[in-house]
Amino acid sequence: MCGITGIFAFNLVGKFNLVNIASATKALYQRGPDHQDIYHDNFVGLGHRRLSIIDTSSVAHQPMWDETNRYCIVFNGEIFNFQELKKELEGRGVTSFFSHSDTEVLLKLFILDKENCLNKLNGFFAFCIYDRQEQTFFLARDRYGVKPLLYLFDEDKFIFASEMKSILAYGIEKELDYTSLHTYLQLNYIPAPRTIFKNVKKLLPGHYLKVEGRKLKVERYYSIPDTIPQQPTTSNYEDAKQKFKQLLEASVQRRLISDVPLGSFLSGGIDSSVVTGLAAKHKPDLHTFSIGFKDEKFFDETEYARLVANHFKTEHAVFSLTNKDLYEHVHSILDYIDEPFADSSAINVFILSKETRKHATVALSGDGADELLAGYNKHAAFYRVIHAGAKESLVGSMLPLWKMLPKSRSGFYSNKARQLQRFAEGMNLSSKERYWRWAGFVSEVNAFKLFSYQSKTNFDQQEFYSFKEELLNTIPAKENINDLLLTDFNLVLPNDMLTKVDLMSMANGLEVRTPFLDYELVNFTFSLPDEFKINSEIRKRIVQDAFKEMLPAQLYNRPKKGFEVPLLKWLRKDMKSLIKDDLLSENFIREQNIFDYKEINKLKRKLFSLNPGDIHARIWALVVFQWWWKKYGMPKS
C-alpha cells in the first residue's frame, strides 16, 4: 500500500510541469511514510511513497526496474496470489527474482502478458508501468476501485497520482466542474470518472489506460455482468451457503499475508464479526480494534464488539471517545481532504485508523458486504417497493403526516419519521429516480437552487443528465435487487465507501483489506438469486445464515446502526461561528459567487430549527466544500 504519481511530458511546455515530480511525490507522504524515491529523464517522471507490507527490504523499493532496465513500475496495493503467480512465471521460464515482493511478480507478469495479466490478479491495485523502449505508459485500477487513480491528459502532458493533492502539486490549471459540483450537492461525493476539476479524471474501476504517441486509450477489462452466468450458479440454498463460506474463508486467508503487524476492525456487526472469526481461526494472536462513543449511546456498539472479541479470544482494544475527542480531529480531516467528500462517517474511520496504526500496519474490515448482500436500509425499502402491498401503500399515502413530524438521525423516533418520509417520497417515482433519490440527501431541483445566477449560467444541464443516466444505466424500468446491488457496486461502493476508507486509513499510513471484495466471492454472489440475499424478514441472509453457528447468538435480531458522528450537535454548537461568521457567511458567499446566499440562509435557519431533518448532511457538504475552496486557493467564479 503506497502512493504513486508520474508525468509524461509530450513537449517543452509539458516539461515545465515535470520539474514538480519531487513535490508531487512528497505530497503523498502520509500514504507511504517508510520510503520515497523518484525517477526522471528528459520527458518522464515517476514517484513513489512506500508503506512497507510485503518484503520490507530495500530491494523492494520503487520505482522498480526489471533486469533489462526497459520496464519500470510504481505500484499501490497488494496482490494476494503473487506466490502462485510467481510459480506460474517460473514454469514459463522466469527463474530470476531479486526480491520477495508482489511488485516484482506483477512487473514480470506484465512484461509477458501485457494487459492480459490483469484478470489473473487477486487483490487491489493501482499501478503504472513505463516502457522506456516503446515510450509508453500503462496504468490500471482494480476491479472494484479499492485503490484510487486520478489523471490529467492534454496536448502537453499526461499526469497521474493516487490523490488530487499530488496532481495539484504539478501546478495545473484549476477550473471548477459544475456538473460535478451539482452531483456532489446531492450525493455528498463525486462519482468517477469525474472530479471537481474539468481537466482531471478518475480511472474507472476495472479499467486500464495506455498513453502512446500523445494518444490516450481507455479500456475496460472487467465488469460484473460479464462474469455472471445466464442461469444462477445454484438454486439450492444449502449448497450456496457452503460455497459462500468456503470462498469467504479463502479470501480472509489470502489477506492474512503480511510481513508487518496485522489486525482486524471489529464493530460488533455481522460483517466485521465474520471476518474476525475467520481470521482468528487462522491467526490465533489476532488483535481487534473498535471505537465507542461515551456521549452517544444510541450509536455505541462496543458491547457487541467485546462480546465477539471474547468469543474468538482476540486481543481487543476499544478506543472510547467523547464528542470532544471526535471534534478535535475534524480540522485535521478537513485539511487532508483534497476533493470535496462529505461522508461524515469518515471522521470515525480516521480516528479508528489513527488509533489502530499505533498497534498494527494492516487491518481487515467488513466493507463491501452491505453492497454485495443487500445490507442497507434502502435495500429493505426497495424490497418493500418491489413487493408492495397495502402497508406500503398506506405509508406512501401518509406523506403529508411524515412531513409534519420532527425528524433527525440522532434519536429512534425522529429517525423513524425521517425514514418514513423518504420511503413515501420514493414510492411513486420511477425505478431510476427512486434509486437516485434514496442514494442522495436532496433532490436535483433543490441542489440546483443553491447555485448563484453565475453558477446556473456555467452549469450544463444536459451534461448533468447524461452523466446521471450513465450512472444509472444498470437499473431497468422494473428493478430487482441484483440490479440495485450492481448499481451500488458501480456508484456507492467505489465513490463513497471505498474512497472513505482509503482516504482516511492512508492519511494514517494504515492498509485496510476487504475480504468481501475478493473477485471470486463477488462473481459467485452476484450469480445467486435475490432471495438468497434478502427477504421480508432479513437482510444479508446468506452471510447471516452461513455463519450462525460460528457467531454469538446476541448479534442476531438487533437493529442495524450506522457508523455516525454527532454532526448535528457540532454544527449547532462547536462549528456555529465557523458556519455563521466564515464559511457560510453572507460576505464570503457573495464574494465567492458560487452559491445563492438566500438559499444558503434558508439551510442555516433550518439547521437551528426544531425540525432539522437531514439538513446537517447538506450543511456538512457545504462546510467541506468551502474549507476545500479556501485551502486550495480556488479562483473566484
Image: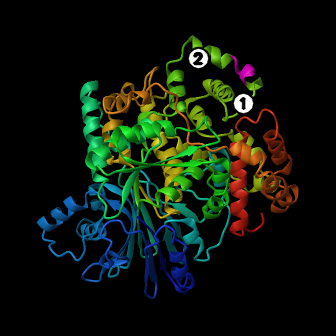
Which residue is at a point 52% across and 38% down the rendered structure image? 301
- Residue 87 to residue 349: above or below: below
What secondary structure is the stretch in magenta mostly built from?
A: helix
- Please rate how many residues cluster around mark 1, counting C-alpha atoms within 10 Å: few if below 14, some from 14 to 19, many from 20: many
- Please rate how many residues cluster around mark 2, counting C-alpha atoms within 10 Å: few if below 14, some from 14 to 19, many from 20: some
Find disc 1 in the rendering and name its residue: 407
Find disc 2 in the rendering and name its residue: 392
State which region is magenta. Answer: 398-402
Between 479 and 608, the residue placed more toward the observer is 608
Mark yes or no: residue 520 visible: no
- Mark 2 or 1: in front is 1
Residue 386 colored magenta?
no
Q: In which quarter of the image is residue 584?
A: bottom right
Say left or right for 332 vs 90.
Answer: right
Helix, strand or loop under label 2: helix
Which residue is at a point 24% across and 65% down the rendered structure image? 113
Quarter that holds the N terminus: bottom left
Say left or right for 53 vs 538.
Answer: left
Task: State which tag comes first along the sequence, 2 or 1.
Answer: 2
Residue 399 colored magenta?
yes
Q: Which residue lies furthest to the top in this view?
A: 390
Q: Which amino acid does label 1 sit on?
A: Lys
